[in-house]
Image: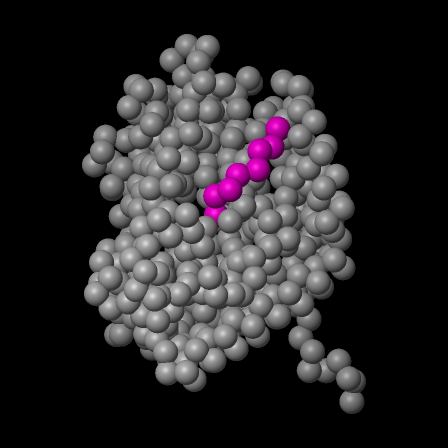
Amino acid sequence: MNHHSNQIIRISCCHICGYNIDSFMNFGRMPIANGFLKKEKFNSEYFFDMQVALCDNCKMFQLINQPEPKQMFNENYAFFSGTSKLMVNHFKDFSNHVIDDYLKDKDNPFVVEIGSNDGIMLKNFAQKGIRHLGIEPSANVAQVAIDQGINTTVEFFDKSLAERIVSEHGQADAYIAANVMCHIPNINSIVEGIKVLLKSDGIVIFEDPYLGNVIEKTTYDQIYDEHTFLFSIHSIQYLFNQYGMEVIDVEPQESHGGSMRYFITHKGKKSVHNTVSNQLEYEVNIGLTKVDSFSQFKENCEKYRTNLLALLNDIKNEGKTIAGYAATSKSTTIINYCGITADHLDCIYDTTPIKQGKFSPGAHIPVKPHNEFKDNYPDYALLFGYNHEKEIMAKEQEFVKQGGKWITYVPEVKII
Ligand code: TYD
């Protein structure tokens, strides 16, 4: 018998360049990260096999299998950007940066944002009377923006929508996006659309979780159904070069546990900052361009999983209580990959009304309103919202005063 017979090697095509890619890691059976559900839906819950690969040709880190976009972004989409104060401020700064550095001298500038969610970013443009258009496929979150007077269309962006926008509003001075580009499997069609939409001297500015941070901090929870890609400068450079565009600047961001902001123009329109070559060199040094170096990442994920589960089991064996804090999308990967169950966590406290009263995807841990946390402090709270650590620590001092302890898993599993 061939000793490889029960080894399944999946070969697929890279989303960007079509090159053959192999999965280097399988995170197992995963539900939809934002698929918070009621009991009646437990039996029909959707799962997929979450495997990741790095394309040897264009260097794009990507999921191999992914649910259809409509499974994830629909009228029930549970993610509302405006729920975090820190992010509200972050997007205000982002908007001011775009306005001050790229729109100030323009005559009646026009800004397009894709994945504009509840209008958290565009409201900063709307308030200043700047022409804007948000493109948001999830009807329920788009409605929140529309109700605030933010121009929004409920659609997926592509070349034909770009053509329609140009004929109705003219070309855009700026195309912006935050935590959206990495969600789009057919991203080539987005960039084709950008090519049509953007004025010859226009600027593309977007940010997403950065592969460099994920690898360095083992924040594998950035890998979930919605994140088709984790970008690096190498892969973004390749993607846009295909369409005659280039990265002219990059700026690391603290949001989402480490993100990167990319500045892109039509080729040859602006000088390229040396931040780009510096970051490219850094990526080569930490191994982001070689599939082989990802075996260390895989080992780290496995080690973190073992450590976290052992810690939770020890605490439960002592008869203590644990609750999850913030039902983030990311927590779906942690919970399901590590095998955390409702026996470990009594519930997860969260501020988003649409998640409350439902159950977490896959493990079916009850999600309760955040304001009940203070009435039922657990012995330990597992910090799923570690990217909001400062904001959360500041508002939950009473929990600690009453003897409560935090458990975190970034940058390592520990009690704080
Ligand atoms: P976010 O970091 O946007 O996570 P992700 O992108 O992984 O979904 O976190 C959003 C979730 O965290 C949302 O469900 C609200 C919740 N949250 C709280 O419950 N309390 C808080 O203090 C904060 C900041 C977030």
x and y percentages locating residue 289 in the rendered image: 73, 49
Furthest residue in direction right, as rendered: 2
Q: Is residue 111 visible?
A: yes
Residue at 46 percent across and 61 percent down: it is 416
- Picture colour scheme: one colour
Number of numbered discs visible in the structure rendering: 0
Q: Is residue 136 above or below residue 6?
A: above
Residue at 71 percent across and 64 percent down: it is 295
Question: For this rendering, which residue is in front, 254 or 225?
Answer: 254
Q: Main secondary structure of the magenta part?
A: strand
x and y percentages locating residue 299 in the rendered image: 67, 67
Residue at 46 percent across and 39 percent down: it is 178
Is 274 magenta? The answer is no
- Span of residues in magenta: 249-256
- On the picture, is 385 further left or further right than 268? left
Which quadrant would residue 153 be assigned to in this image?
Answer: top left
Q: Is residue 413 above or below residue 132?
A: below
Which quadrant would residue 240 be assigned to in this image?
Answer: top right
Q: Is residue 96 above or below residue 326?
A: above
Question: For this rendering, which residue is in front, 198 or 306?
Answer: 306
Which quadrant would residue 117 be assigned to in this image?
Answer: top left
Question: For this rendering, which residue is in front, 134 or 283?
Answer: 283
Residue at 43 percent across and 84 percent down: it is 317
x and y percentages locating residue 333 in the rendered image: 48, 64
Q: Is residue 196 visible?
A: no
Q: Identify the image quadrant of the N terminus.
A: bottom right
Furthest residue in direction bottom, as rendered: 1
x and y percentages locating residue 340 in the rendered image: 44, 74
- On the picture, is 160 further left or further right than 4? left
Q: Is residue 10 above or below residue 277?
A: below
